[in-house]
Image: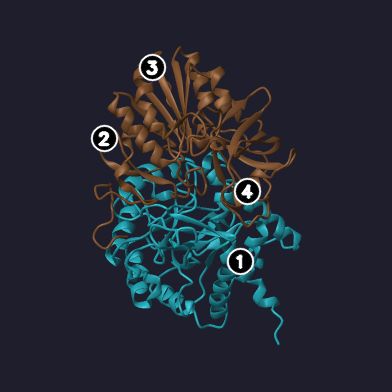
Amino acid sequence: MSAASVAPTAGGVTQVVGSVVANDPVGAYRHLVISAPGVAELASPGQFVALAVGGPTSATLLRRCFSLHRVDAGRGTVEVVIAAHGPGTTWLTQVRVGDPVDVVAPLGQPFPLPAEPTACVLVGGGYGSAPLFWLAQALRERGCHVELVLGAATRDRLFGVDLADGTTDGVTVTTDDGSAGHRGWVSDVLGDVITRAGATEVFACGPMAMLKSVTDVAAAHAAVAHVAVEESMACGVGVCMTCVLPITTQDGVTKMLRSCVDGPVFRGDSVRWDAFANGICHVPADTVGAPRAGGH
Amino acid sequence: MSTTLGPVTLPNPVMTASGCAANGQELHRFFPVDELGAFVTKTVMAAPRSGRGTPRMAETASGMLNSIGLQGPGIEAFLENDLAWLASVGARVLVSIAGNTAAEFGEVAERLASSPAFAAVVGVEVNISCPNVANRGLVFACDPVSSDAVVRLVRESLPATTPIFAKLTPDVTDIVTIADAALGAGADGLTMINTLLGMVIDTDLLRPQLAGVTGGLSGPAVRPVAVRALWQVTAAMRDGRLPTAPLIGVGGVRTGRDALELVAAGASAVQVGTATFNDPSRPRRVVDELEAEIARHGFTRFADVVGIAHDRMVSP
């Protein structure tokens, strides 16, 4: 199912058959550079790409979504960081230079940038840190002080420690096993970093459990957390309704919102973390249109 | 490529499939939705509905399971926001409706008929076959008596000039019996097929992968089931066992050639569903691809291809 290029529209999204410019190993991950003309000039940090996998006749139909790591309008490229989990991501980690990849991007809501210069802490779990360096650059261009906290299970699952030096005012590293930086979780060190930097904003991307603890730590230190959630998506463009999560909206009610169009970036304190347990997200009883007795 | 569905003529026979295209604005970023024969909306019920918990999706070979649970804004918000927008861009709309009871189906149809944007509505698809409801008894299409009550109430709530299509599940012993009940109750046509009830077990956690346990199977994997259902109902119509009525084919269409297969089995129009997740431009591409297929076979009228496989079957 090769796709002809679709011209960008008012929705600020484009679809293009890109081609692989580079595919390099970086720790436990692959760093892909894809030529995808028309995407970069539309994109902001926090947005994502949806990549088709397996070629035109693939039996793996659903797109794989990745945070944009970097874009280059001059070269017409987008960059993503990929970990091989299943057949789709494995296929993507094995693409060669020159291979076609069908790209739909940019998608979703970007990280909100503060109106006034302030101190910010950016928190990345594993390759969830991919979008944070571009974000750091955008924040520093606005006069913000930017510190980074990078955490992972092991040293090889960290991403971007080497990129942090040039783009931030400080970086703190944690690993579960102590193979790099502090032994423990990002939430163990985050409070001190927020306090030391005098940060008012925290931006985070990584596993859901980490995002919840980042939200809690930020709140305890009078900072606002903006989290890019990780929900599995079938389409990435807002038509399948699979990537929903319970969000408390501005009028105080909880709705099941799509992370692909209303997110992936949400205020951490708007996410109903109480609904998540054991890899399942339940519909809170007070959600608009929640199932009545007997379910639905 | 125009096609006639009862009292309605569409410029081409390609539609979105309900629940695979939201309500238009998202796909309109990729192609003008008014270029489709019709835009089929996500099933709407009387009240807002949250749908089920997550995970709601499991990828399968050449398809997927979904367990959305008919999440939707409710008919009032749908009319105010979604239908009004679809009308504003000139889309021809096939509105998919459902209810927890036969009476609710009727109420939703009645509200729809009173909408200022009703002129954009070319028909109503009655979803009596969604598998993602806790009470499987709600799958009216599994029971001829229930189907009959729902279709009758919807028919009474809409102008006679608005065709209604009952959407059927293939998860029944005999789809011809259900088709007969729906047509007998006043449906002008049928949409076949809805998803098949399926289940995936996560082999790492050794537990059901979906929060809702079971889900609807869709995608190219189910296309042979759609072809079979269309074939059986069309054959019954040709034999005089069923009244003749237009069929809308849906199930596993990814390309023009896939669409042609459903048309040859008896579909007068074709919906593109799961393939849209793979490529948001797919429904629009299928319009051109199907047109090319019809031309490749040397036909000048789309209608001449509908059900043609019945004529060309080699009898033993």
Residue A62 in the figure: left or right of residue A231: right
Q: Alpha-carbon distance for marks 3 and 1?
A: 63 Å
The residue beneath circle 3 is: A197
Residue A199 in the figure: left or right of residue A180: left
Q: Alpha-carbon distance for marks 2 and 1?
A: 47 Å
User: Sequence order check: which comes first, mark 3 or mark 4?
Assistant: 4
Foreground of the two, A212 or B255: A212
Residue at image point 31% right, 47% down: A275
Residue at image point 28% right, 59% down: B107
Q: Which chain is brown?
A: A
Where residue B144 appears, x then y in whole percent? 38, 77
- Helix, strand or loop at label 4? It is helix
Amino acid type of the residue tagged 1 in the rendering: Leu
- Helix, strand or loop at label 3? It is helix
Q: Which chain is cyan?
A: B
Q: Alpha-carbon distance for marks 3 and 2?
A: 32 Å
As displayed, is residue B132 above or below residue A141?
below
Where residue B161 appears, x then y in whole percent? 42, 61
Q: Alpha-carbon distance for marks 1 and 4?
A: 34 Å
- Tell whether label 4 touches label 1 (CB within 8 Å): no
Residue at image point 52% right, 30% down: A131
Mark 4 surroundings: few (<14), some (14-19) or many (≥20) residues within 10 A: some
Amino acid type of the residue tagged 2 in the rendering: Asp
The residue beneath circle 4 is: A90
Q: Alpha-carbon distance for marks 3 and 4?
A: 39 Å
- Chain letter belonging to callout 3: A
Mark 3 surroundings: few (<14), some (14-19) or many (≥20) residues within 10 A: some
The residue beneath circle 1 is: B262
As displayed, is residue B212 above or below residue B21?
below
Foreground of the two, A43 or B203: B203
- Tell whether label 1 touches label 3 (CB within 8 Å): no
